Amino acid sequence: MNAVRPRWLRACVSEFAVLATLVAAPVLLARIGFSVDLLTRVLNWGLIGLGFDILFGLTGLLSFGQAAFFGVGGFVAAYLLVSGTLASVWLALAAGTVAAGLCGVVVGWLAVRRIGIYFTMITLAFGQMAYFIENSPLSKYTGGENGLPGVPVPVLGLGPNAVRIGAGLPMYLLFATIFFVGYVLARRIVGSPVGAVLRAIRQNTGRVAMLGHNVAAYKLAAFVIAALYAGLAGGLLGSFQSYMPPDAFSLETSGQLVVQTIVGGAGTLIGPLVGAAVWLWLRDNLQLVPGLAALWKLVLGIAFIVLVIGLRRGICGEIIHALNERRNRAAANAAAARTAVIEAAGGVAAIAPARQAVDVTLPLPPAATGTCEIALEARSLSRYYGGLKAVDGVSFKVRRGAIHAVIGPNGAGKSTLFKMLLDEVSPSSGEVLLFGDRLTGAGVSRAAQRGIAKSNQLNQLFPNLSLRENLRVAALARCRGPLRLDLWRAADSLPEVERQVDAILALLDLAPRADTPVHILAYGEKRRLEIGMALATSPNVLLLDEPLAGMSPLERAATCGFIRDIARGRTIVIVEHDLDAIFGLAERITVLYEGRLLADGAPDEIRRNAAVQDAYLGGLHADEPA
Amino acid sequence: MEFDRRQLLLGGAGAAAGLLLPGVGAMAQSPASIGTFPDGVLADSVFVGLTIPLTGVFSGDGGDLKLGYQLAIDQINAGSDVARSWGLKGKGVLGRQIRYKVSDTEGKPNLDVQSATQFIQRDRAIMLAGSVSSASAIALEELGSREKVLYMVGIAGSNDITGKNCQRYGFRSQQNAYMAAKALAPVVAKALGNNLKAAFLVPDYTYGHSVYASFAEFSAQQGWQQVAKEVVPLGTTDYSSALLNIANSGADVFVNIAFGGDAIASTKQAEQFGVLSRMKLVVPNLSSFQDKELGAELMQGVYGSCDFWWTLQDRYPLAKTFVEGFVAANKYYPRWGAHIGYMQTYLWALTVERANTFHPVELIKAMENSKAAPYDTTIGKVYFRAEDHQMVRPIPILRGKPPAAMKNPEDFYDIVDVVDGESVMNPPELFGCKLGPYS
Amino acid sequence: MPSWPALVSQAFNGLALGSLLALVSSGLTIILGTLGVLNFAHGALFAVGAYAAFVMLQYTSSFVLALVAGCGVMLLLGILLERLIVRLFYDRPDEDQILVTYGIGIVLVECLRAAFGGNAQRVAVPSWGRGATKLGFLIYPTYRLQLIAIIAMLLLGLYLVLYRTAMGLVVRAGIENPLMVGILGINIRRAFLVVFAIGVVAVGLAGMLYAPVVAVTPDMGANFMAQSFVVIVLGGLGSFSGAVVGGLIAGEIISLTSAFNSSYSDVMLYALMALLLVLRPQGLFGSEGRV
C-alpha cells in the first residue's frame, strides 16, 4: 500500500499527543489556575480512569465500587511503609497493586456473573463493604477514620546518592511517566484481540459467547485490569501526599470516578483524565469567585447537569466523534448510498458466478477426522416451561456431511430445539450428542469451540463495528481458544485469523464493504454476514435458523446456492419456512408439530406424508365440522 | 530577616502587659529559609490559608469557625482598638496585612491536604489553619511538619493530636478529651452525686473511644459505675437499639459522647425513649450548635463542657470585645468554633510580634516557651506546653438553663465552673507524643 | 449473647425501622421498575421532604396539615423534575440517567444548605405523639408506634393505587414492558410522570415523618438512600411488594445485628446484598429472567 506515513507512526499519533500534552501541561495550564499539585492529582484520577475506561467504556460494565481497589492498593502500600515492614516505596507500590488485583479477582469472579444494573449493584455492595470494614474492624491497620499519615515519598537510586522525589515538579514527572506508560499499555490492550472481544461484548454479549469466547473470563480480565490500575493509583496517592485518606474507600470516590469518566467521555481512555481536569479545576476555581463561598457546589451541580444533558458522549467523545464524522463522512455517505442501491435492486449485488468453495484454514476439532457417522444426535430432547411443553421427547440423527432440515408450523418448537442443539438452552430432559460425545451441559461457548455454530433468525451482529471487525471477533474464537490473554499484540496481527476473515469475505462476496460499519449495511448483506459469522468459527456442524427470512426471491436463490457451496465438507441443519427451498436443498427432513416429532425421512416421503399435510393445513379432519 | 526602622521603633516602644519576650536566642541555628519563609512574607502582606468544611456534615461548625477567623483577621488588618487591646501594634501583623482564602474541604481529610498544599505551593501561605474533625487535623499537622509551615489546629478534641500524632509544627488550643473529662467529672459528681450508675453512648471512631476512655476513668474515680456501654457506628441515624439497652440498664446518668449531627439525633431519640426523663444527661464535649438545634427544653439541666461559651464575656474583657464584635458582624452569639478561630489567629499574630519575625522555627520556639510569658486572651492567661503543644487553659463547665431562665434567645447555659487548666493536664508522655525536628 | 428481652425489643425496633425503609424504598423501586431510572437523588428528596415539613410547621401547628402541604410541595417538585430533566433521559443509556439524578441530588442538597444553613433544624414530635408507651416489659416512643401504623396505611394506599386502579395497571404493565404499553396506544409518558411523582411524594413523606426523630440537616438522606439500595435488591428490582417485605427484613437485620455488635451491622447489610445479587439476583419477588 502507499501509505504516506509509516503505519506505526499513524497508529501512535495519540500517544505522541498525550506525551506532548503531559510535557506542556505544567507550563501552559499554570496560567489558567492549574498548579502542579492539582495536575498531579488529575493524573492520579486519570490513572484510575484508564483501567475504569477499559471496564466501562470498552466492555460496558459500570462499576460503582472502584474505590474499594483504590483503597486496598493505597492502604496496603501505606501500611507496609508506615509500619516499617518495607523500606522501598516501589516495592510497597507493587505490593499494593498486586493486593488490589487479587481483590479484583475475588470480587470480579462474583460480579461478572451478572449484567447491567445487577452488576452495578454488586460492585456498589462490595465497595460499601470494603468501606465499612476499613472504617471499623480493620481500623488498627488502616487508622480508621483518621487514615494513615506519614507515608514516605519514593526514592530513586540507592544509597547516599538516592534522590527523593519531593513535592511539586518531581512528583508531577513521576506521575506523568507512570500515566504515560499506563496509557500506552491501555492502548495496546484496547487494540489487542482481548480488546476486540471486550468491545464486542459490549455490543452483543450473547453473540460473543455463541462464537466460542469465554465471556465471563474476559469480563473478569477487564475487571482485574481496572482493579490493578486503581490499586496502583491508590498507592501513588498515599506517597504523593504522605497521607492515605480514609475517604479513599467511600462511595463518593467511586461516584466521582464515574462522573469524571462520563463527563470526559467514556471509551476514549483519556476521557477520565479530561473529566478529572474539568471537575477538579471547577472545584478549585469556583470557590475563588467572590460571593460564591459555600454556593460553589450548587453551581458545580448545575453545570454538571447541563453538561450531562448536552454532551451525549462526553467532552472527548464529542470531539472524537466530530473528527471522525469529518474524516469518514465521504466514506460513510458512499456506503449508505450503496446500501440504498442494493436494497432497491432487490438485495442482490452482482455475484460472481464461478465461485470456488473456499476451504477454511483453521484447524478442525479432532472429531471431524474421526469415524463417527452421526454428526449430531438428539435423544429424547424435551423442554418444558411450566406447564407448556415446547419440545417433547424429540429424537433424531443428523448424518455427517448431510444437509438436514427441520420444519413445522409456527409454535412447533423449532427455535427451542435449535437452542438445545447448541446448548444455548438446557433441556428439561434428554441430551444432545456431537460426534458421539455429549454436548448438553457444556454451555454455548464450549459448544462453539467443539465445532458447532449457529446463524440466528434475528441478526446477532456487532452493529458499530465494521464488517471485517465482526468477522475477526468470530475467527479469533477458534484460533485462540475460549480465553487467551494476549494483551499486547494488535488485534489484526494473527495471520491465520486474517486469512480466515479474507476467505469469508470473499465467500460472502462482501469484500468491497469490508470496512463499513455493520449498521449501515443492507438487510440482505446483514443476513449473509450472519451466516458468515457462524462460518468464521470453522464449524463442523452449522445450524442455520431461517437463513432465508426476509429475503427477496432473487436473494433466496442466491443464498440457496451459497448454502450448497458451504455444505461441502460440513454438516448443515436448517430450520426454514420456505418449503420449496427446503425440498430443493435438504437431503433429509424432520418435521415437528406442537413440540413432538411428527415425521423424519427423505424429502419425497415427507411431501407425501398425510400427517404432515394435515399439520400444515390446520389439521382439518373428515369427522369435524368445517 | 528584614529589619526596617519601623520595626525597630515598634519593638523599642514596648508592648503593654510586658508581652515582649527576650530574644529567643540561637537565631543563628535556624536556617535562613525554610518552608514558605521568607518567600511568603511580602513587603506589605502575608498569606494565611484556611481549610474549612463549608459543605458536608460539618458545615454548621465550619461556618462558625470561618466567621471567627474572619473577625480576627478583619480586626487585625484594620488595627482596630480590639487588636490594640490584645497587644498588637499598628495595622496588620508586623505591618503586613493578612490575605487569606477559605477552601471548602467538605469535611474530607483528603481535601484538607489538597487545599493546604495548594495554599503552600500557589499562595506561599505562611500559616495554615482550620479543619473540623480530628482526622483532618492529624493530616494537616503532618503536612505542616513536612512542608515546614505552621499549622494552628481548628476544632479537634482527640487526645492523639497532642498525643501519638503530635507534630512539631502543630499547636492546639482546644482542651483534649483527657482534660475535659478530668475537669468535668468532679464538677458533675458534686452536682449529681457520687456512686451513680452511668450508661455510655460511644460513637465508634478514635475520637469517640478517646473521650470515652478519659471520661470513664475520671468518673470512676468519683465512684461512678458503668452499667451500659453502647458503641454505635459513626453517622447512625437510628439509635433505637442502643437506647433500648440504655433505657433498660437502670442507669442514673446518660453520658452521650456522640458529636455533631449524631448528638442531635441521639439526644432527640433519647428523649423519645424516655431516657432523659429518668436519667440526667452529661455531654463531655458539647457540640457547637447543639443548644439551638435541640432547644432549651431538652438541654435544660444537661452538664457538659466545651471550649468557650459567650457568657464568659463577664469574666474576661477580651471575651467581651470578641462577643460584641461577633454579634455586631454576624447577628448571632459565637459558638466555640468561632472562638477557636478568633483566638488562634490572635495568638499567632501576638507570637509573630513577640518574636519579631515570621520565621516558623522562631515562632514555634516562642510558643513552646510561652509558659514563661503567658498570653492574655479571651479566656484569661494561657500558654502552650512545650512537650506536646497542647494549650494549658481554663475549661468552662456548663449546665443547660431551663427555658424560663433564658435572658435572650441564645442564653442556653449557665457557667457552673471554670476549671483551672494546669490542674487537669495529662502527663505529656501519656499519649505517646514525640515531637519531630524543627527543620 | 444478649438476653431474650433485649432481642425481642430489637426485633420490635426492627419493625419500626423497617417500615420506614419500606416507604423510602417503595418509591425508589417503582421509579426503577417503570422508568428504568436508578434515582440517585432519592436521598436528597428525603431531605427535601423533611425541610418541607419544617417550613410548613412554621405556618401551622397541625402536624397533619403540614404533612399534606408538604406532600403538595413534593408533588410539585416531582412533576417539575420529571418534566424538565428526567424526561430527556428515557432514551439515553442507564449511566446517563444515573448521572443526571446524581447531579440533581447535589443541586437539591446544596439548595437546602444555601436556604437553611448547615445546622440541624428543629422539628418537634407532634403533640399526639409525645411520650412513651409501655408494651409489656418494653417501653417504646409513642410516635414510633404511630409511625408504624401511619406508614402501613400509606403503603396500603399505595398498594391500592398500584393494584386496584386503571392507572396502577398501566404502571405495572409499564414495569413489565414499557414498549408494549406504548404500542397499545396508552400514553406511557403520562404514566411515567405519575410514577415519578408518586415515588418522589413517597420518599418525601418518609422524610417528613422521620424529621422529628433525626437531625434535620441537608445531608440527612445519604444514609437512607444507601440502605434503600440494599432493600430494593433484597425485594427484587421493580417489585413494590418486594420493597415492603425487603424493607422490613433489612430493618430487622440492622436491629438484630446491632444487638450483638453494631460495628458490623453495615457490613452485614451489604454482604447480604452482594450475596443475593450473586445467588438470587431477582430477590424475593422480582421476576426471573429479567437478570
Image (cartoon, coloured by chain):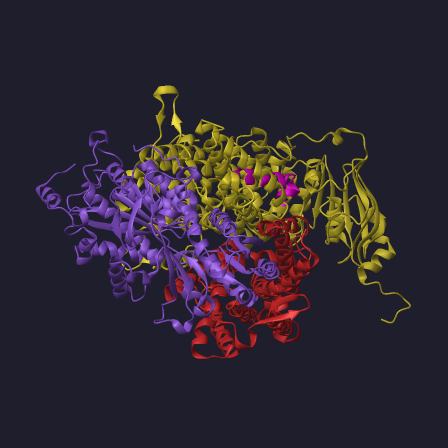
Name the residue: 73% across, 54% down. Answer: A577
Residue at point 64%, 35% (across, down): A482
Nearest the eye: A123 or B42: B42
Q: Which of the pair B54/B235 is nearer the observer?
A: B235
Q: Position of residue A480 (x, y in %)?
A: 62, 32
Position of residue B59 measured from the top left corner of the image (x, y, whole percent):
39, 57
Which residue occupies the foreground of this view, B163 or A41?
B163
Magenta span: predominant SS is helix
Q: Position of residue B18 (x, y in %)?
A: 18, 46
- Determine whether A155 is above or below A110 in the image: above
| The C terminus of chain B lies in quadrant | top left
In terms of image quadrants, where is residue B248? bottom right
Residue C12 image-quadrant placement: bottom right
Residue C38 visible in this rendered orientation of the protein: no
* Residue A226 is inside the magenta segment: yes
Query: x and y percent of residue B183 in the render?
Result: 41, 52
Against B306, residue A97 (above or below) is: above
Q: Along the line of sight, which residue is nearer the eye, A466 or C166?
A: C166
Q: Which residue is farthest right?
A: A623
Query: Is residue B290 found left or right of A32 in the rendered image?
Result: right
The colour chain A appears in is yellow
- Segment colored magenta: A207-227
Asked if residue A256 shows in the view, the reply is yes
* Total numbered labels placed on residues in the image: 0
Please state if C232 lies on the left or on the right of B329 as rendered. Answer: right
Residue B196 in magenta stretch = no
- The colour applied to the residues of chain C in this rendering is red
Colour in which the image shows chain B: purple
| Quadrant in which the N terminus of chain B is drawn | top left
Q: Is residue A598 above or below residue C137?
A: above
